[in-house]
Every structure is written in C-alpha cells, then in structure tokens.
Image (cartoon, rainbow, N blue to C red):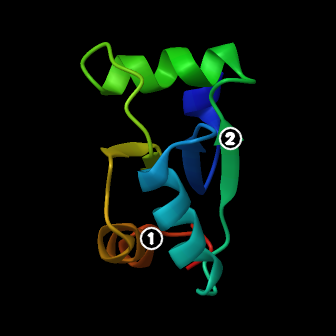
Amino acid sequence: MAEDRAGVVVYWRPGCPYCMKLRLRLRFTKLEYTEVNIWRDPDAAAFVRSVADGNETVPTVTVGGKAMVNPSKRQVMAAAARAPGSGA
C-alpha cells in the first residue's frame, strides 16, 4: 500500500505546477526521496485522497509515514531532519 512506503515520498501528477515546483527544488538538495505519480498508481491516489479530505491534492509528501498536503521545500526538509532514517 502507498502509505507503507518508507522514508520520504513525494506524490505528484503530470501537469501540476505545484508538483513541478517542489520536485525541482528538492532535486537540488541531498534529500533521498521517492516520487510516485498518482495517475499511474491507484493505491497512491487513494492514499492521497485519504489524507486530503477526499481530494487528489498534490504534491502530497510523506515523511516517516506522516503526510503533508502541498508542503513547501522548507517544511519537507524540516520534517525529514526530524525523522530518523528518512535520508536527510
């Protein structure tokens, strides 16, 4: 299941400008993370809906299993720094 993915996971979809912005900014960090396209992974889309009030709001990021809907790079990096074993 999508929520079982370890570490930092960025859920995104093609054409989303907020996803593009966050993914680009994270690429310039040393953070290790996994990207999941919710249009190609129905379980991931269902997970995003479960944490975003029934909407497929992306980017949604999980850090150590805790979800953040449409976070900033700063929020992701801070959460990763606090999470043991997240790759930060």
- Which quadrant holds residue 5? top right
Earlier-in-chain disc, 1 versus 2? 2
Give the side of residue 7 with respect to residue 22, left or right. right
Give the side of residue 88 with respect to residue 50, left or right. right
Tell me where residue 64 appears, x and y as whole percent: 48, 53
The image shows residue 3, relative to residue 11, as above or below, that is: above
The image shows residue 83, relative to residue 65, as above or below, that is: below
Q: Is the N terminus in the top left, top right, bottom left or bottom right quadrant?
A: top right
Tell me where residue 50 appears, x and y as whole percent: 37, 17
Q: Residue at x 41, y 79 (%)?
A: 81
Q: How many marks?
A: 2
- Which quadrant holds residue 40? top right
The image shows residue 32, relative to residue 66, as above or below, that is: below
Q: Residue furthest right?
A: 40
Amino acid type, mark 2: Val
Residue carrying label 2? 36
- Whether label 1 touches label 2, CB < 8 Å: no
Tell me where residue 66 appears, x and y as whole percent: 38, 45
Amino acid type, mark 1: Ala
Give the class, few, some or many, for how many residues have Cα within 10 Å of label 2's Cα (few <14, many ≥20): some
Q: CA distance from mark 1 to mark 2?
A: 18 Å
Label 1: state its secondary structure.
Answer: helix
Inspect this view and state whether residue 20 appears.
Answer: yes
Give the side of residue 65 with respect to residue 79, left or right. right
| Front in this rendered view, residue 12 or 2 | 12
Label 2: state its secondary structure.
Answer: strand
Give the class, few, some or many, for how many residues have Cα within 10 Å of label 1's Cα (few <14, many ≥20): many
* Disc sitting over residue 48 in the figure: none
Residue carrying label 1? 80
Q: Residue at x 58, y 50 (%)?
A: 9
| Mark nearer the viewer, 1 or 2 | 2
